[in-house]
Amino acid sequence: MLNTAGGITGGDRFSVAAAAGAGSHLTVTTQAAERAYRSIDAKPGQLETTLTLEKNAQLDWLPQETILFDGASLSRSLTVTMHKTARFLMVEPLIFGRTAMGETVRKADIFDRITLTRGDELLFADRVKLSGNIQAHLDRATIAGGARAMATLLLAAPDAGRHLDKLRALLPATAGASEIRDGLLFARILAEDGHALRQSLIPALTLLHGADIPRTWML
């Protein structure tokens, strides 16, 4: 896709749906970064993504970064339903202002939700909510320690745990990875900016993808 919605501002509503049929392999990526612009509407911009994986399917959800601008208001949800034999890889990178452009995010609202169901079981639910002075929040040692970029990385597969040691070896000190339950590998990565984040993400994604990732991801 060009990107999941183009540029989002207050009151916008977008939805994306993709499905990997039985035995298929689908990789979804974007050619450009998503942008959440300053909102003058009381309602947040909304982006809803729904992914479905059937028996023995593989789906790689690899969108490029979402850039959050000062004054943005964004509510996103990613809902994944997968067969117990399927394999799902996802990354969601988020940039809090373009540091190379001198941008800061002093006021914004973001609510990010990821929900993954495998078979009839809720396997993973992640919620990130930041509002007000985002830069001040990120500067706190207990939140981001001054980082201006972060990513959520997830692999749900029967053999996910075998990648844990190699993944940890690739990650910087500002990241953590765990097999939080059988067949579910999770990592959160913090970085000083988008370029540094990609330097960590590209080798990690290549490892978990098992092959070269889409060319749009290259530095």
Image (cartoon, rainbow, N blue to C red):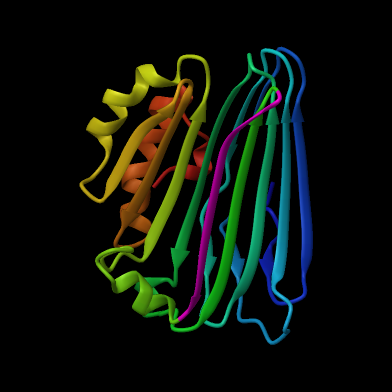
Q: Quadrant of residue 50?
A: top right
Q: Which residue corresponds to the image point at 44% horizontal and 21% vertical from the top-left?
A: 160
Query: Where is 69 relative to 164, above or below?
Result: below
Instruction: Give the residue at the far front of this rendering.
Output: 121
Q: In the visual, does 9 lie left or right of 214?
A: right
In the figure, is residue 13 to the left or right of 9?
right
Q: Is residue 3 visible?
A: no
Residue at position x 35%, y 70% in the image: 138
Q: Residue at x 68, y 53 (%)?
A: 4
Vertical side of 140 occupied by 168: above or below: above
Q: Is residue 129 magenta?
A: yes
Q: Position of residue 101 (x, y in %)?
A: 39, 77
Q: Position of residue 85 (x, y in %)?
A: 63, 13
Q: Is residue 161 magenta?
A: no
Q: Nearer the viewer, residue 121 or 57?
A: 121
- Residue 105 image point, x, y percent: 45, 79
Magenta span: 120-132
Q: Main secondary structure of the magenta part?
A: strand
Q: Which residue occupies the foreground of this view, 181 or 156?
A: 181
Residue 133 visible in the current orientation: yes
Q: In the figure, residue 8 lies in which quadrant? A: bottom right
Q: Along the line of sight, which residue is nearer the eye, 125 or 147?
A: 125
- Residue 89 is situated, as x and y percent measured from the top left of the image, at 54, 31
Q: Is residue 28 left or right of residue 64?
A: right
| Residue sitting at x 44%, y 72% | 97
